[in-house]
Amino acid sequence: MLWRIAPSIAFLGLPLSIRKLNGSPKVSETIGGAAASNLTSTSAIDEAIRLTGAFEQAARTHLAVMSLSARAIVRAWAEAEIAIQAARCSGEPNAAELPSAEEFRAAPHLAREEISREVITRWRAPGGQPLGDQDEDRVLYREGRWYLPLMGTDRPAMFLTERGQFERVTYAEYMQRAEAPLLIKSLSVPGILADDMPGWLPDRISTAACAAGVLARLDELMGAPVSNRAERVITHEYVFHHGVSKPNIPTIAISAIL
């Protein structure tokens, strides 16, 4: 039994080209395929590790900058709103009409805008409206009558009796004004680590938050330590090792027992 296994073991130790010459391409290809698969797997792992490291570096670098930028934007908004409120209360002409600091973020309404006008000739549908460009090209004539066939057939869908001229006006439609959500409620920059203070989070800001409250929240963030983790609790536990000795019974206790 050992003699039959030994040649196989020796064969596996031969170079790939020699093994193929010995008439066993399936064995060599299997081993070669396993090696290639191992290389591919290693390469995929290396690539995953490389990209994970790149993400961490990008997050550490950019989140730190984004935190400072977010706080600067929020502070500028709060200071502008305080100034706007003061101006509105000043009694100066037109001061009451001052818009909010975020007015520039709103998308303005767009009025209907005419692009072109042209006169066209079209078949008129029974309701008087002109046929569309595609239907106009599908009109057929049979037995002295013009008609629009059912889609995909030559059977009449409607009969047509009159053509007319229409003025086709091409225009861009009206669009309503679009308001942007309040920046202090939509802006969110988390800390780098799970227990780091955020650059800015809207979770503690109400929709009707006043600018002074926002400034107070900013000062709280700026004055807080980078880490927001609670202090670790110091405690102890007992782990039994082994007994040291049996306690001696005091002499007085022995006398009492006797």
Image (cartoon, rainbow, N blue to C red):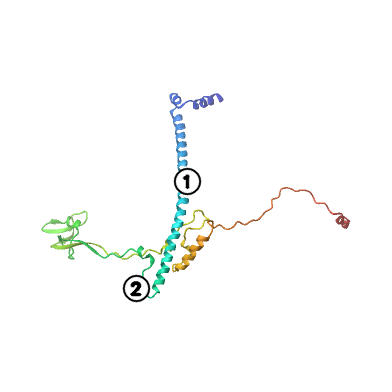
Residue 105 place in picture, x, y as percent: 36, 63
The residue indicated by pointer 1 is 53
Image quadrant where one finds the N terminus: top right
Residue that protrudes farthest toward the left in the picture:
144
Q: Nearer the viewer, residue 214 or 246?
A: 214
Q: Residue at x 45, y 29 (%)?
A: 28
Q: Nearer the viewer, residue 198 or 44?
A: 198
Q: Which mark is residue 217?
A: none
Q: Is residue 203 visible?
A: yes
The residue indicated by pointer 2 is 94
Residue 126 place in picture, x, y as percent: 17, 64
**For residue 250, side relative to residue 49 (left or right):** right
Residue 179 place in picture, x, y as percent: 36, 65
Task: Give how far apart the Cα atoms at labels 1 and 2 are.
Answer: 56 Å
Q: Nearer the viewer, residue 94 or 220?
A: 94
Specify the amino acid type for callout 2: Asn
Q: Residue at x 46, y 51 (%)?
A: 61
Q: Earlier in the sequence, mark 1 or mark 2?
A: 1
Specify the amino acid type for callout 1: Gly
